[in-house]
Image (cartoon, rainbow, N blue to C red):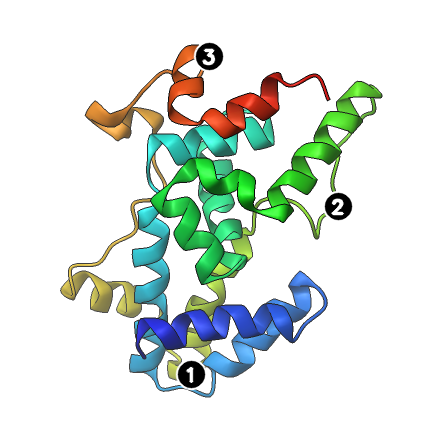
Amino acid sequence: MDEDRFWELIERSDRETRSRKERLAWLNTRLCQLSADEIIDYHMWWELNANRGYTCDMYALSCYLLRRESTDGFEYFIYWLMSLGREAYDQVADCPDRVMELPQVVHLLDLKRRWFAERRRGLPWSDEEYPGFELLAYVALDAYEQVTGENVDILYAALKARGVRSRFPLLAAEFGEQDWDIADDAEVARRLPRLARYLTSPN
């Protein structure tokens, strides 16, 4: 399986289903029709693309959107961005500030702004809208176990042999020299100007 086929499955799973639960089931069915090697290929492309989002700018995006600092939330935010498809993910991974070009993100930010302005409790979005999609990362693992009857450790060993490993879970300190203070408004404005303009606009 090449990268094009990987993204085709991600995008078709969205187009051909109406909920996250249906989407996971759709992907599971398709992956279970593949060989063990193809399932490993799929998860390799998943990990390689998810790793592209491992930057401090992307971490800042997740913190501002979720309104909390959370390394788990960051990881699941990356998975949600991937769920939006290749074009959307590529543009944000290459230039995180372009997240403001995604209608899904602008919608969520508008929901959050109105929600907090009205001092309402709970979350401003539904489970289907929530900007995190943890379970999407496990589809290939479940399919691998179903197809082979083997523990997913075998899959991880195969990826390790290819030099591929997940960069999650993580600690913010692991960003190293690229780290910056996401609470610094001036730095946010410099690195993520469109997001900063939205956050400081009155409406």
Mark 2 residue type:
Ser
Q: Whole-percent x and y of residue 16? A: 65, 76
The residues bearing labels 3 and 1 have C-alpha atoms spaced at a distance of: 50 Å
Instruction: Decide which of 41, 65 is in the foreground and name it.
Output: 65
Picture quarter with the N terminus: bottom left
Residue behind mark 2: 126
Q: Please say if the residues under marks 2 and 1 sit with CB atoms less than 8 Å apart.
A: no
Picture quarter with the C terminus: top right
Q: Sequence-wise, which precedes: disc 2 or disc 1?
A: 2
> Which residue sits at x=50%, y=45%?
76
User: Mark 2 packing: few (<14 Cα in 10 Å), some, or many (20+)?
Assistant: few
Residue behind mark 1: 147
Q: Identify the mark at residue 185; answer none if there is no mark.
A: 3
Mark 1 residue type:
Val
Vertically, is 46 above or below 95?
Answer: below
> Which residue sits at x=60%, y=21%?
199
